[in-house]
Amino acid sequence: MDTYILYGITILLLGISFFKDKKKTKMSLKKAWKAFENILPEFMVVILLVGVLLAVLNTAVISKIIGAGSGWFGVIIAAVVGAITLIPGFVAFPTAAMLLQGGAGYMQIGAFVSTLMMVGVVTMPVEMKYFGKKLTIMRNVLAFIFSFVVAIIIGLVVK
């Protein structure tokens, strides 16, 4: 139901924008479409990979590797995978939801999403170029450690 309300509000506001300035509205819709076209390949690849992962690994395997029963071993695995994976935020949260439905634990998903958003192993060369090696390594190490703090807090809250 919330989705229909949001769509309705969006259409209403788009209509108001269109009546206020047709040229700007058309231009913004074209820019939005180009952004969508640029994002779509990344989004589809990640959704495809997660879909294949969920199809190949049944809920028992996911639960064993990063389920609530996997403990700190699962948190570490999830944090490492999140740190080396490059997934945009708008894909990370639906991915986390699919993994939770597939049997992953909350602490493990907390560590996964935290490192996914804050640690950039793949982007380190670019970051080093702009911020320097020492700052980049320090930021990534602190962010990695912080992801475990997030996992602990989630573990305490979601019981």
Image: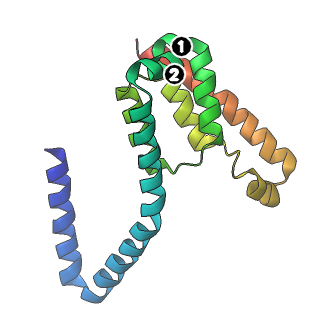
Q: Residue at x 41, y 75 (%)?
A: 34
Q: Point out residue 129 in the picture as x, y percentages from the top left corner.
A: 81, 60
Q: Position of residue 43 (x, y in %)?
A: 44, 55
Q: Quadrant of residue 13?
A: bottom left
Q: To which quarter of the image does residue 138 belong? A: top right
Marks 1 and 2, how far apart in space?
A: 6 Å
Q: Quadrant of residue 141?
A: top right
Query: Along the horizontal axis of the image, is 130 left or right of 86?
Result: right
Name the secondary structure under disc 2.
helix
**Pointer 1: residues within 10 angstroms few (<14), some, or many (20+)?**
some
Which structural element holds mark 1?
Answer: helix
Which residue is rendered at x = 40% and y = 25% of the image?
Answer: 58
The residue type indicated by label 1 comes to: Ser
Is mark 1 in CB contact (under 8 Å) with mark 2? yes
Q: Residues within 10 Å of mark 2 (few under 14, many from 20)?
A: many
Q: State left or right for residue 63 relative to residue 75.
A: left
Which residue position holds label 1? 70
Residue lying at 62% horizontally and 16% vertically, measured from the top left:
73
Counting from the top left corner in percent of width and height, residue 48 is at 42, 48
Which residue has dot 2 on it? Answer: 66
x and y, in percent, of residue 86 in the image:
59, 48
Q: How many numbered markers are drawn?
A: 2
- The reply to whether residue 105 is in sight is no
- On residue 58, the disc is none
Q: In the rendered image, is residue 126 in sight?
A: yes
Disc 2 marks a residue whose amino acid type is: Ile
Rendered position, 32 above or below 63: below
